[in-house]
Amino acid sequence: MTIGAMESSRTVDSGGGRRQATRQKLYEAAVTLIAEQGFSATTVDEIAERAGVAKGTVYYNFASKSVLFEELLRHGVGLLTASLREAVDKTDEEGGSRVDALDAMMRAGLVFIGRYPSFTQLYVAELWRTNRAWQSTLMVVRQQAVAVVEDVLRDGIANGELSDEIDTPLTAAALVGMVLVAALDWQAFQPQRSLDDVHAALSLLLQGRVGGDGLGRK
Amino acid sequence: MTIGAMESSRTVDSGGGRRQATRQKLYEAAVTLIAEQGFSATTVDEIAERAGVAKGTVYYNFASKSVLFEELLRHGVGLLTASLREAVDKTDEEGGSRVDALDAMMRAGLVFIGRYPSFTQLYVAELWRTNRAWQSTLMVVRQQAVAVVEDVLRDGIANGELSDEIDTPLTAAALVGMVLVAALDWQAFQPQRSLDDVHAALSLLLQGRVGGDGLGRK
DNA sequence: GTTTTTGCACTGACTGGTCAGTGCAAAAAC
DNA sequence: GTTTTTGCACTGACCAGTCAGTGCAAAAAC
């Protein structure tokens, strides 16, 4: 469970030294604990203990428990969007279609969730809550991720590859949901399945080859 | 937000009088509060207050806060599965195809979520958590709902209407996720859209008419 | 038909424990 | 010598769950 092993996050860190390493340890400890138990049920003492750090250090590095959590969210979604965009770019280089790009994004999503299941869990659990301190952070962060999918859909409609009947924002949300829930279910209830199995099932749905007559395109 | 107006719960009540009415009030108070804030962040005092009842009454009616929550979950998922099954049955009466049945279930899902958004929120937020007291309750309850979808998929494959390439459990999970997330997103971020809009977008995806050439069946 | 008892539903003050956050001096790392 | 971390005692708010007691209607006893 390494929520961000990268040393180069645009805004956040800079001077990657001891401080940054401590923050990283705290992120990792917090993400699993909060995914398992929820934000309120997770104590700062627990987080500090799992990170192998004194409680005071938590407060030396973060203003409060919720700030720690908010930064964790931003951090994680940054990784996700980067990974989605990378998938799109790679498809573009290879001259793939827009459906190929969507397919590649689904796979990238699955890989991400496979790597950071706790983060995904926690994201889903908090996203649709209202009345919470970090509501606005989540809105921004959600929009970032969904926007990548919306862009690809819009491109596809523009170049005629996708039907102009498509409702971009709703379809994007549905696609994200499909991947998110299928992946979480895979992890939680059918962990013996391979990533390829899950990807194949989602691909089939995306490409409309669910009907038995094989009418859908390939 | 009437989570269950029935007077005949097998084990629980009998003599549906004052007691049952109180429980109902507590369900309704708890479901919204927990959806907004999460289980741990919601206090029993808050629930009691919103239900217009003394704290002691909560404990007179439920063994503990978690038991209240568990019964709430069972209650809600009961309503959902009933509604899904009803949609399937109605399709059967009208001699609809299996894809029609899936489509009808999606709509039923959307209607349910539109009626009980808080319940849905809370369900999604808790489903993939691990290490929680009500884990097993959730597993059972999830299986009930997903099973309805799986049944329809299996029927469709058996009668050749759906491709036998389909992976039943994974596809069922993906479909449920699609509806769940699209609906929650609709409620939370695009509430101005109509149920028909959302349903149309999901239908398009289900029937594989996303590609611009209209190859998919209708 | 009046008094007493019983059982149910509910009440709200109280308790024992928990937890976010603080303060600070000393040590370690840089 | 400055920054970061440690260890630990402390505080005050908050909260799940308890319990002695109330209100009331129907039954039992007289």
Image: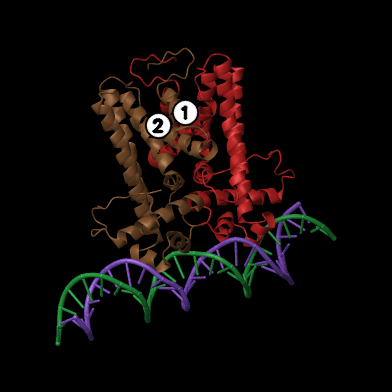
Chain colours: A red, B brown, C purple, D green
At a point 63% along the width and 47% down the height, the residue shown is A71
Quadrant holding the N terminus of chain A: top right
B175 or C23, nearer to the observer: B175
Residue B198 percent coordinates (x, y): 46, 30
Chain ID at mark 1: B
Measured Cα–Cα span from mark 1 to mark 2: 17 Å
A83 vs B206, left or right, is right
- Secondary structure type for disc 2: helix
At a point 62% along the width and 38% down the height, the residue shown is A78
Residue A165 against residue B202 in the figure, above or below: above
A182 or C10, nearer to the observer: C10
- Amino acid carrying mark 1 in the image: Asp
Are dots 1 and 2 on a single chain? yes
Quadrant holding the C terminus of chain A: top left
Residue A193 percent coordinates (x, y): 39, 34
Residue B107 percent coordinates (x, y): 38, 32
Quadrant in the picture for residue B200: top left
- The residue tagged 2 is B175
Q: Which mark is residue A85?
A: none
At a point 41% along the width and 64% down the height, the residue shown is B53
Residue B167 shows in this picture? no
- The residue tagged 1 is B197
Residue B69 against residue A98 in the figure, above or below: below
Which of disc 2 and disc 1 is earlier in sequence? Answer: 2
Residue B6 shows in this picture? yes
- Amino acid carrying mark 2 in the image: Leu
Chain ID at mark 2: B
Label 2 Cα neighbours within 10 Å, binned few <14 / some 14-19 / many ≥20: many
Quadrant in the picture for residue D17: bottom left
